[in-house]
């Protein structure tokens, strides 16, 4: 969600802070601010709106002198977007400045406690409570004060703190919300994500829960809340800087759509050795896997849609019962899981708050946790029994594309791997699946070469008010993602329905000119889906049909057809999702939407 940066060193802090915040714009925000120590006091500058407003206010940072500072991009949760509610927040005395990601759940009780004791508040945010508590409990020892405050607050947080009495250091604290320390030469950084500091350093520490970092220009010391020192290994980031830049593309989303063939290859190739799938990174034994009575898949958003695909694929191929849950629902439905349950947790960031909480819930029942994540060393990865990294590289656009595709790639790898263990796929099927898996990136490239066809159709349909996606089986699972992608970035009302459910109410919404996107890639269900197409067409719908290249007869039933290469049924979603991503992208572009940073959305949802 929100973005945190901090700098301490020999250069001017403000330009560094603005540069870091610019790299975090993809996380979503509605205001921005910086605080810099000028040698005498803490100077705060903040503004509602885009980062450029703040940058212009302080002349790109040149108007603010000082070599120690913290910055923030805020996505409103408590209090409307405004200058006053923007971070950083100062304590009443001006002694403490704080930036915060996350939510302080008991802030109302704490705020009331402080107000009764004469503390004045200047914003509606939960974050300001942290600044005022630091001031209220301050005894002259900054670390003791921070630990005291942490004992009072409930919730999730990543904090960057500057104290006027200790202006040669930044204090960084993490509980749940991600926070990293960037290590430079005579300068150090804090950030909520790697792109913020990638141009400055590739060596980082990742803070874990309840850890406190004391950062100066020449040193980083990490302790826990008992004040015991914590030893960390330096993690070296090997991303190309260009991987986090647009590389000549108009948007990050389009760049990431085009990167999917490479990302898919990067996910599968290291795990295929001598024509066998090998998971060197997981500890789960064949005997353990055979003991599982069911699989539960837990995720949010697009990762949940990957889980819906996985349910169809696993049950068809492994013949094990599979449940798939939205993480926020899994936690509160008293799920039936035990030590005979494999729980697969899917998250791009590895920090998704509801997914992390669901993981812990499942673990408390004794379930075995296997996570699929992109970010190495993330909270979900660290708390899982096993983790399979997607190795998708940085994904900047809020609307996911290549993270979704690489998560699907891992699902296929696991399907073949586990099917072999259980003996539910024959050796002939194993070779066929593996061969098809290797061809998927080439077939994605083939689809991308025909992207202008989707662009043309989008140009005819971008002014629709309502769009419906229909499909059966895996096509229905994929419809969920196609619909989400469209509504995320174009703001068009869109819904996905199982095609067989149309006559149970949904078809009443179809009228002249309503656009229906009909997915009909599943060979055995093609004719049934075409019957549903006829139903909506007879009620005035305009239909985009998406099918495999061996079904040209679809053109008799639809207004526009787009074809994908044939592959085995279980892998069709990896191909069919590409035109759906492109359609959403082109519609949003034609509407003039801010594609990489859609309104009200954030890349990493680190609060419940």
Image: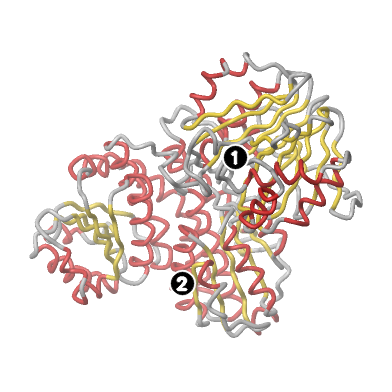
Left or right of 118 on screen, residue 56: left
Residue under circle 2? Answer: 313
User: Looking at the image, what colour scheme do you see?
Assistant: secondary structure
Residue 391 visible (yes or no): yes
Residue at 61% in and 64% down: 277
- Look at the picture and state if 6 lies above or below 368: above
Dot 2 surroundings within 10 Å: few (below 14), some, or many (20 or more)?
many
Query: Could you tell me residue 28's position as x and y percent?
Result: 50, 41
- Look at the picture and state if 164 lies above or below 228: above
Residue at 76% in and 48% down: 207
Residue under circle 1? Answer: 3
| Front-lying residue, 224 or 556 | 224
Q: In the rendered structure, find residue 145 and report the number of the disc placed on it.
A: none
* CA separation in Å, label 1 and label 2: 37 Å
Query: Could you tell me residue 435's position as x and y percent?
Result: 49, 61
Residue at 64% in and 32% down: 71
For the residues labelled 1 and 2, say whether their Cβ atoms are less than 8 Å apart.
Answer: no
Quadrant where the image shows the C terminus:
bottom right
- Could you tell me how many numbered marks the image carries? 2
The image quarter in which residue 495 lies: bottom left
Residue 268 visible (yes or no): no
| Front-lying residue, 576 or 602 | 602
Residue at 50% in and 46% down: 602
Query: Could you tell me residue 345's position as x and y percent?
Result: 59, 65
Q: SS of the residue at dot 2?
A: helix
Q: Residue furthest right?
A: 228
């Amino acid at each position: 969600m929100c973005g945190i940066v901090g700098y301490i060193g020999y250069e001017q802090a403000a330009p560094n802070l603005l540069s870091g915040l610019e790299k975090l714009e993809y996380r979503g925000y509605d205001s921005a601010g910086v605080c810099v120590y000028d040698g005498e006091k803490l100077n705060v500058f903040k503004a509602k709106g885009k980062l450029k407003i703040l940058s212009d206010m302080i002349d790109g940072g040149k108007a603010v002198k000082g070599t120690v500072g913290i910055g923030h991009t805020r996505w409103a949760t408590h209090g409307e977007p405004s200058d006053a509610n923007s971070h950083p927040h100062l304590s009443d005395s001006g002694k403490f400045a704080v930036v915060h990601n996350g939510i302080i759940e008991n802030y109302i009780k704490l705020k009331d406690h402080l107000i009764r004791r004469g503390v004045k508040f200047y914003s509606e945010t939960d974050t300001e409570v942290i600044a005022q508590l630091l001031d209220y409990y301050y005894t002259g020892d900054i670390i003791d004060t921070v630990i005291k405050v942490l004992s009072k607050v409930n919730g999730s947080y990543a904090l960057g703190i500057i104290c006027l009495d200790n202006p040669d250091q930044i204090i960084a604290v993490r509980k749940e919300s991600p926070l990293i320390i960037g290590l430079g030469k005579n300068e150090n950084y804090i950030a909520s994500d790697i792109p913020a500091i990638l141009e400055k350093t590739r060596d980082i520490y990742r803070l874990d829960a309840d850890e406190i970092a004391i950062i100066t220009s020449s040193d980083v010391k990490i302790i826990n809340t008992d004040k015991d020192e914590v030893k960390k290994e330096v993690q070296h980031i090997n991303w190309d800087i260009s991987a986090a830049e647009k590389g000549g593309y108009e948007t990050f989303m389009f760049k990431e759509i085009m990167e999917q063939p490479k990302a898919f290859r990067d996910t599968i190739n290291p795990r295929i050795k001598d024509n066998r799938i090998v998971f060197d990174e997981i500890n789960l034994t064949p005997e353990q896997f055979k003991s599982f009575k069911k699989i539960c898949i837990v995720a949010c958003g697009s990762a949940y849609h990957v889980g819906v695909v996985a349910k169809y694929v696993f049950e068809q191929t492994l013949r094990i019962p599979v449940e798939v849950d939205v993480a926020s629902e899994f936690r509160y439905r008293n799920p039936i899981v035990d030590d005979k349950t494999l729980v697969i947790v899917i998250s791009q960031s590895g920090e998704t708050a509801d997914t992390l909480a669901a993981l812990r819930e499942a673990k408390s029942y004794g379930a075995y946790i296997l996570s699929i994540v992109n970010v190495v060393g993330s909270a979900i990865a660290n708390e899982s029994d096993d983790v399979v990294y997607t190795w998708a590289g940085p994904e900047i656009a809020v609307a996911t594309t290549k993270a979704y595709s690489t998560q699907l790639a891992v699902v296929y790898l696991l399907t073949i791997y586990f099917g072999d263990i259980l003996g539910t796929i024959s050796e002939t099927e194993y070779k066929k699946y593996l061969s098809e898996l290797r061809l998927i990136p080439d077939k994605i490239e083939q689809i991308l070469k025909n992207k202008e066809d989707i662009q043309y159709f989008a140009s005819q349909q971008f002014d629709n008010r309502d769009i419906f996606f229909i499909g059966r089986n895996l096509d229905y699972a994929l419809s969920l993602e196609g619909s989400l992608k469209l509504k995320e970035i174009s703001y068009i009302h869109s819904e996905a329905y199982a095609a067989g459910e149309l006559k149970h109410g949904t078809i009443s919404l179809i009228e002249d000119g309503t656009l229906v996107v009909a997915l009909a890639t599943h060979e055995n269900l093609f004719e049934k889906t075409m019957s549903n197409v006829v139903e909506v067409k007879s009620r005035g719908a305009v239909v985009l049909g998406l099918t495999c290249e061996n079904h040209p007869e679809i053109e008799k039933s639809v207004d526009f057809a787009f074809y994908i290469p044939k592959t085995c049924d279980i892998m069709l979603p990896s191909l069919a999702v590409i035109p759906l991503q492109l359609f959403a992208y082109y519609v949003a572009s034609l509407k003039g939407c801010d594609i990489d940073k859609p309104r009200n959305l954030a890349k990493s949802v680190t609060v419940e």
